[in-house]
Image (spheres, rainbow, N blue to C red):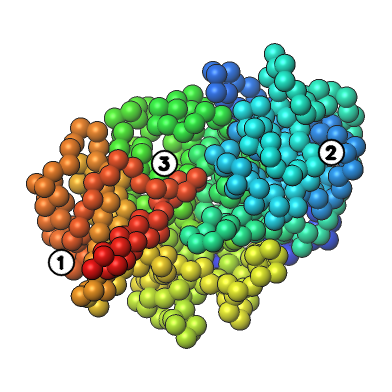
Amino acid sequence: MKTLQQAHQEFDFEKFLSEQLVGSSGAVNAYVECCQRYVGLNKTALIWQGKNGQSATWTFEQLAEASGKLAHYFSSLGLNAGDCIAGLLPRTPELLITILATWRMGAIYQPLFTAFESKAIEHRINTARTQLIVTNEEQRSKLNNLAIEHVLTVHELDSLNQQDDDFWTEITLQSASFEPVMASFEDDFLMMFTSGTTGLAKSVPVPLKALLAFKGYMTYAVDLRAEDSFWNLADPGWAYGLYYGIAGPLSLGHSIIMDERAFSVDNAVQIIQKYKVSNLTGSPTAFRMFFGFKEKFDPSIKAHLRVVSSAGEPLTPEVIHWFNHDLNVNIYDQYGQTELGMVIANHHALAHEKKVGSAGYAIPGHRFAVLNHAHQEVEAGGIGTLAIDYAQSPLAWFNGYDGHNRKSFVGHYYLTGDTVRLNEFGGVDFIGRADDVITTSGYRVGPFDVESTLLECEEVLESAVIGKPDPERTEVVKAFVVLKAQFSASDALNHKLQDYVRSRLSKHAYPKEIEFVSELPKTSSGKIQRNLLKQQEIAKAQGIQKVG
C-alpha cells in the first residue's frame, strides 16, 4: 500500500487531471464525466430500492437516453446553460435523471431536501434565481405559493390532478440525442447552501473543478474499488450525499445505491445484506444508531463489509471499537464542509498513523494549517482554527459565498471555523466548532470529549453537551441525554453518569448539569444543533436575570 507521504509527494495536478477526466480544464461537462464516458460498457449505474418494495437497476446507457430526452424538454422551455434547475425529489431514478439532464445542458443543479418546507425552499430558489423545479405529487404543495416559473411533476399513474407537465409524459415526446454543453473549470454545476448556525443559509456555488477533488476523496480516502458494492447513506439533498453518493462514484464509473425509504437501522441492514455492501459511507449519527441497535447486525455482514467511512462529526471510541471487533472492519473519521468537500481524512487506500478521535490528514491535493488568533501557524500540540492553505491546495475550489463573499478567507487561508489540535503525528484532533468550545473556570472543554464519554455508558443512546452561562465559572458543562428505551431517568442515574465522566475524563469536564430529553435538535442532515440548546439556556439565564 502506498503511503500518504508518497501520495502527497507524487501528486501532480495536471497529471491527475489528464488521468481522471476525459475533458480538460477549458472544456468539461459533468454529465460526460459521470455518465456518457461509460456508455457502451454495459455497466450498472443505479441500483434503486423503492419505498413500496419495488426495485430496479439502470445502466449508464438507460440514463443517457432518459437524460437526453429531459434535457430537450428543459431546452424547449427556453432554459440554457448557466440557468439553475432544482430537484425536490426523494431518492428515485427521476432525481438522478434530473441531475444528469441539468448537467448535460450546462445548467446548474440545485438540491432541495425533501424535509424542507416552503420558507426554506423560497429562500433558496430566490437566492439562486432558480428557473425550474422538478418535484413529485407528495412535495408539490410546498410550491403552491412560491414564485417559480416552471414546475415539472412526477405524477402517480392514476393521478387525476395534474396541474403541471408530467415528467414521464414529456420525456416520451423528446429526442434522446442532446449534445453536451462544454464549460470551463470555473463554471458552476452545483448550487449548494450551508446550514449555518446563525442567519439564513448562504449559497455555495460549486465549480466544475470540484469533480477532480471529489474523485480524489473517493480514491484516496474511501478507497472505492471496481469490485466494491458501494452505498452512501447520506441523502443527496445535502452535500455529502450529492458530492459522494452521486457525482464522485459515478465519475469513476461506479454504480450507486439509492434507497427511497426513510432511514432506519432495519432498512439499512436490509440493504447492506441484500446488495452485499463492501464499501459504506455515512454520518456518525447513522453509525451511532447502528451501535445502539447492534443486535440487528447479522454476523454474515462481516463476510463482505470491507471499509466504512464517516463524515460530519467525530466518531466515538465505542462505535469504532464495535466496528473493529464485532464486524471486523475499519471505520475511519473524515472531515469536510459543504464549502470544501472532503479535505481531511483517515485514508483507507493510503498507509499512515491512525489515531482514534483524529480527523486525519490532508487528502492529496490539499494542505491544511492550524492558525492561532494572529493567524500564524501553530506547532505540534497547538490549538487553533483549522484552515485550508489555498496556496498549496491545487484541488481546492471554493471561491466564496454567493461566488464572491470571501469573508471566510484571510490571505491565502480559508478559515473553517472549527477548533482543532495539531497532533503529534501531524494530523488534526477535532475539538469543536469555535462557538461550541466550552470555557469553564479557565479550562477549555470540547463538547465531543464529554459526549463521547457519556456514550460509553450503557444507558445512553445520544448526548449533546454545551456550555451553560454561569456568573462564577463563565460557563458550566451541561449535558442533554437521550436514554435507551429500557432505561428511565432518575437522580441516581444522573449521579452515576456524572461520576463516570468525572472518573473517566476529568474533574473539570464532567457535566455539572444533566437534562434527560426524549430527542435532540438536529439539522435535516442529522447533525446535532448544539447552538439551539445553548441559545435555550442563554434565554433561560436572561429570563432569570430580568425577573431578579
Q: Nearer the viewer, residue 55 or 353?
A: 55
Q: Nearer the viewer, residue 279 or 430?
A: 430
21 to the left or right of 524: right
| Eye-nearest disc, 1 or 2 | 2
For label 2, count other residues whose C-alpha is less than 10 Å away and answer few (under 14), some (14-19) or many (20+).
many
* Image x and y of residue 140, in percent: 66, 32
Q: Nearer the viewer, residue 13 or 124?
A: 124
Figure quadrant of the C terminus:
bottom left
Please state which amino acid type lies under the numbered disc 2. Answer: Phe
Please state which amino acid type lies under the numbered disc 1. Answer: Lys
Disc 2 to disc 3, C-alpha distance: 37 Å
For label 3, count other residues whose C-alpha is less than 10 Å away and answer few (under 14), some (14-19) or many (20+).
some
134 to the left or right of 433: right
| Residue extending furthest toward the top | 158
Disc 1 to disc 2, C-alpha distance: 62 Å
217 to the left or right of 360: right
Residue assigned mark 3: 286
* Image x and y of residue 350, in percent: 49, 56
Residue at the image point whose x is 47% and y is 64% from the top: 361
Disc 1 to disc 3, C-alpha distance: 31 Å
Disc 1 is placed on an element classified as: loop
In this view, 153 is above or below 374: above
Residue assigned mark 1: 507
Residue at the image point whose x is 75% and y is 52% from the top: 129
User: In terms of image quadrants, where is residue 34?
Assistant: top right
Residue assigned mark 2: 74
* Image x and y of residue 396, in percent: 64, 65
| Eye-nearest disc, 2 or 3 | 2
* Image x and y of residue 427, in percent: 42, 67
Chain-order first, disc 1 or disc 2: 2
Q: Nearer the viewer, residue 136 or 190?
A: 136
